[in-house]
Image: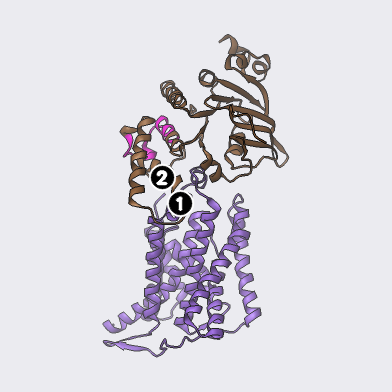
Chain colours: A brown, B purple
């Protein structure tokens, strides 16, 4: 079955059980091409489980996932990655003992990891050039020779994004990108996400930080105990009584 | 009095035994790097290599076919072990695949003993002289001239493959972080199987080298390798290719020299562990391992 082209990613009634524990139940979301789609919800709502199912690290117990109209649930992670879905981890997980530029170079390797032949010098040069372009795009051009582990958290998150971009993805899933950041770092990150989106990358954002997600998202879903509690434009969602009662608390609408 | 000639003789003899340790440890170090599991069944793959070469040789008389058998049969065995023992257990605590691996090793040994008999089988390859030869006053077993260079060349080839090829870079990425590597497009199962195949070919060749050196094979020839290869990868540093080679050679030489000059106050194996303990006191991460 082919889906309408406007949604690049769609989950259809995705349910996931871990043993007897229900992590997700009948989750159906649509991510419009070119949008920033936010998924908010408290800890344990199933946000990361949903990400992992989309990325291919987990198989849904029930339900289907479509990317560009084709089913991807159950496909191995590397195949999902090479189709154009990249993601960042909540806690930055670069290659800590390597420099920033080497991290990006390693990420660019996605294209030549296939096969077992020797790496040509020309390929290597192209990759290095590309890596510097990406470093510049995410604002890491001054830190290319630093070890990944020496960077402050805000910059490590940028490196995560750089690594995701190295795949030249159509969709980037960001797992709590603003977690642990100072207000200033979060603001800079917001600008970065906006500028990437303007360049045509579809963004899917998992956020705990509601104002951050509200400001960025074109469309939002609220996950609560593994189910979609509400969806819509950000201002509609945060004024939805169900969302206020279950998640935001009475203070949010007033504050 | 220690003469230079006898010292060199002991060194060469130690290097020869050490080469066999190293060749088996290489596969172990590859698997440990990727899956963080001690692949004890690797010693079984080594026995399989010895017997595959033996069967190919006695039925055809061709040394080339014996080498091919020592490579191909273990490669298949290694991939099967990876598929049934390790891949389904990726999410389980690491002691579970370890126990399965020990069980698989014992099973392989006993299967071979039941099929081919418990006793060692003579395995002499024609054209390789068994009589010691004399080079400038140093008496050498001719097999040393095959075993040591083959192992060193194999290690160099492996090192080259890991640092210069796509497969090698993909393996390194998996070793650093399996999930991140997959998110970057690395086909994890494929790379794991390639690694098992390569490691198992080395173990099989080591099984053949054992036969070349000792002139026989036995179903239990893997017993010593099972734990010596562990000593070697601890000595060399977990996951390091060069470490496995150097660790193997150091262990072989240390055993040989210590037993020759101190005598058998302690069994050979005890010297191996004394060397290990001393080294770990000085350098806990092993010779080529990275400190955490």
- Furthest toward the top, the residue is A254
- Where does the magenta region start and end? A143-160
Q: For the residues marked 1 and 2, what is the alpha-carbon distance in whole angstroms?
A: 9 Å
- Asked whether disc 1 touches disc 2, contact meaning CB atoms under 8 Å apart, the reply is no
Residue A106 is labelled as 2
Image coords of residue A91 (percent x, y): 49, 35
Label 1, secondary structure: give it: helix
Q: Residue at x 37, y 65 (%)?
A: B156
- Residue B202 left/right relative to B219: left
Whether B207 is drawn above or below B161: the answer is below
Is residue A147 in the magenta section? yes
Q: Residue at x 56, y 81 (%)?
A: B55
Mark 1 chain: B
Q: Residues within 10 Å of mark 1 (few under 14, many from 20)?
A: many
Could one spot residue B249 in this view of the protein? no
Q: Which residue is mark 1?
A: B170
Could one spot residue A83 in this view of the protein? yes
Is residue B149 in the magenta section? no
Q: Nearer the viewer, residue B65 or A164?
A: B65
Label 2, secondary structure: give it: helix
Q: Nearer the viewer, residue A103 or A70?
A: A70
Whether B166 is drawn above or below A190: the answer is below
Q: Residue at x 37, y 69 (%)?
A: B153
Quadrant of the rendered structure where residue A14 is? top right
Q: Residues within 10 Å of mark 2 (few under 14, many from 20)?
A: many
Image coords of residue A178 (percent x, y): 48, 26
Mark 2 chain: A
Task: Please name the predominant secondary structure of the magenta segment in the image.
Answer: helix
On the rendered image, what quadrant is the N terminus of chain B found in?
bottom left
């Amino acid at each position: 079955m082919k889906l309408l082209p406007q949604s690049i990613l769609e989950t259809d009634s995705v349910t996931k059980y871990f043993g007897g524990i229900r992590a997700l139940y009948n989750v159906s979301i649509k991510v419009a091409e070119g949008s920033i789609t936010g998924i908010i919800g408290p800890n344990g709502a199933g946000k990361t489980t949903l990400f992992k199912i989309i990325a291919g690290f987990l198989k849904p117990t029930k339900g289907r996932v479509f990317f560009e109209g084709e089913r991807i649930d159950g496909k191995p992670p590397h195949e999902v990655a090479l189709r154009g879905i990249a993601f960042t981890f909540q806690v930055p997980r670069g290659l800590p003992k390597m420099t920033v530029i080497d991290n990006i170079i390693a990420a660019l390797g996605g294209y030549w990891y296939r096969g077992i032949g020797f790496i040509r010098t020309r390929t290597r040069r192209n990759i290095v050039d590309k890596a510097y372009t990406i470093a510049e795009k995410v604002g890491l051009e001054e830190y290319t020779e630093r070890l990944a582990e020496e960077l402050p958290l805000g910059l490590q998150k940028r490196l995560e994004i750089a690594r995701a971009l190295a795949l030249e993805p159509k969709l980037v899933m960001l797992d709590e990108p603003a977690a642990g950041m100072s207000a200033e770092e979060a603001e800079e990150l917001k600008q970065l996400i906006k500028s990437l989106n303007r360049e045509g990358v579809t963004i899917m954002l998992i956020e705990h930080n509601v104002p951050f997600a509200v400001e960025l998202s074109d469309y939002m879903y609220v996950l609560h105990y593994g189910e979609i509690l509400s969806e819509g434009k950000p201002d509609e969602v945060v004024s939805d009584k169900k969302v206020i009662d279950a998640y935001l608390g009475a203070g949010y609408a007033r504050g | 009095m220690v003469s230079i000639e006898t010292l060199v003789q002991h060194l060469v003899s130690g290097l020869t035994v050490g080469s066999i340790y190293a060749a088996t440890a290489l596969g172990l170090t590859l698997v440990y790097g990727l899956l963080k599991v001690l692949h004890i069944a690797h010693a079984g793959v080594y026995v399989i290599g010895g017997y595959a070469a033996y069967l190919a040789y006695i039925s055809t008389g061709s040394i080339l076919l014996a080498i091919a058998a020592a490579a191909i049969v273990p490669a298949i065995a290694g991939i099967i072990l990876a598929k049934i023992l390790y891949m389904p257990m990726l999410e389980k605590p690491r002691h579970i695949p370890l126990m399965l691996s020990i069980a698989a090793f014992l099973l392989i040994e006993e299967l071979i003993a039941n099929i081919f008999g418990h006793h060692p089988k003579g395995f002499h390859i024609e054209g390789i002289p068994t009589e010691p030869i004399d080079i400038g006053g140093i008496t050498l077993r001719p097999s040393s001239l095959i075993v040591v260079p083959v192992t060193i060349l194999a290690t160099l080839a492996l090192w080259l493959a890991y640092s210069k090829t796509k497969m090698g870079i993909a393996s390194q990425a998996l070793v650093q972080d399996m999930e991140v590597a997959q998110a970057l497009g690395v086909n994890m199962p494929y790379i794991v199987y390639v690694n098992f195949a390569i490691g198992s070919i080395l173990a099989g060749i080591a099984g053949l080298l054992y036969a070349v050196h000792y002139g026989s094979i036995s179903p239990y020839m893997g017993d010593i390798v099972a734990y010596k290869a562990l000593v070697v990868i601890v000595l060399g540093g977990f996951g390091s290719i060069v470490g496995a080679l150097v660790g193997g050679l150091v262990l072989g030489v240390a055993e040989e020299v210590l037993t020759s000059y101190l005598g058998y106050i302690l069994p050979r194996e005890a010297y191996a562990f004394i060397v290990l303990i001393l080294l770990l006191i000085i350098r806990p991460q092993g010779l080529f391992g990275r400190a955490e």
